[in-house]
Image (cartoon, rainbow, N blue to C red):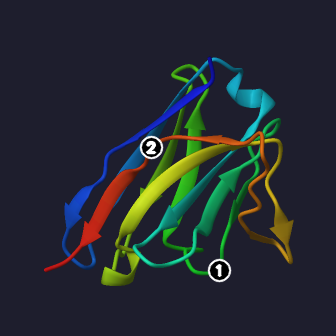
């Protein structure tokens, strides 16, 4: 059974950092891309970052490029999202999603969910003083 479970969220002050984890099971991590997206109340889902399947190439949206870093540990079947320089606009529920490939336009990642994509329940990130 394909499973993804996010963790590592919490409350952090502006300027702070968090590292989110996405534990995966039921599939081979290197056979799929893993993306991260977030959704704040009343807002649309926003794609953030993606690590591609075979060679682990990473892509980012313009809104987080330079602040967020996506990585993976294939031995642990886990993907990480390191988030630095957080600000209140980053407050949202964060999700990881299994995709066939990273959707990229002009070098930037964008979220393009397909019916067979699978994501977890999310982890809440709150940036507030």
Left or right: residue 79 compared with residue 123: right
Nearer to the camera, 35 or 69: 35
- What residue is at 54 percent from the left and 58 percent from the top? 69
Is 24 placed above or below 57 here?
above
Nearer to the camera, 31 or 97: 97
Mark nearer the viewer, 2 or 1: 2
Left or right: residue 14 compared with residue 56: left
Is 57 placed above or below 55 here?
below
The residue carrying mark 1 is 62
The image shows residue 88 at horizontal and vertical percentages of: 31, 82
Label 2 sits on a secondary structure element that is loop
Q: Quadrant of the N terminus?
A: top right
The image shows residue 32 at horizontal and vertical percentages of: 77, 35
Can I make out residue 33 in this image? yes
The image shows residue 112 at horizontal and vertical percentages of: 77, 61
- Disc on the earlier residue, 2 or 1: 1
Is 40 placed above or below 76 here?
below
Left or right: residue 114 compared with residue 39: right
Give residue 50's mark: none
Give residue 121's mark: 2
- What residue is at 36 percent from the left and 75 percent from the top? 85
Is 22 placed above or below 88 here?
above
> Gap in Å between the C-alphas at discs 2 and 1?
25 Å
- What residue is at 83 percent from the left and 66 percent from the top? 104
């Amino acid at each position: 059974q394909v499973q993804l479970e996010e963790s590592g969220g919490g409350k952090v002050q502006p300027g702070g950092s968090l590292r989110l984890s996405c534990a995966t099971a039921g599939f081979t991590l290197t056979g799929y891309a893993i993306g991260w997206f977030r959704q704040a109340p009343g807002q649309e889902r926003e794609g953030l970052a993606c690590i591609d399947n075979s060679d682990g190439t990473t892509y980012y949206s313009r809104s987080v490029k330079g602040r967020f870093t996506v990585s993976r540990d294939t031995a642990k079947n886990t993907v990480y999202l390191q988030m630095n320089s957080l600000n209140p606009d980053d407050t949202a529920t964060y999700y990881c999603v299994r995709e066939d490939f990273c959707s990229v336009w002009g070098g930037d990642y964008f979220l393009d969910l397909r019916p067979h994509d699978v994501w977890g329940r999310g982890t809440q990130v709150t940036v507030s003083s």
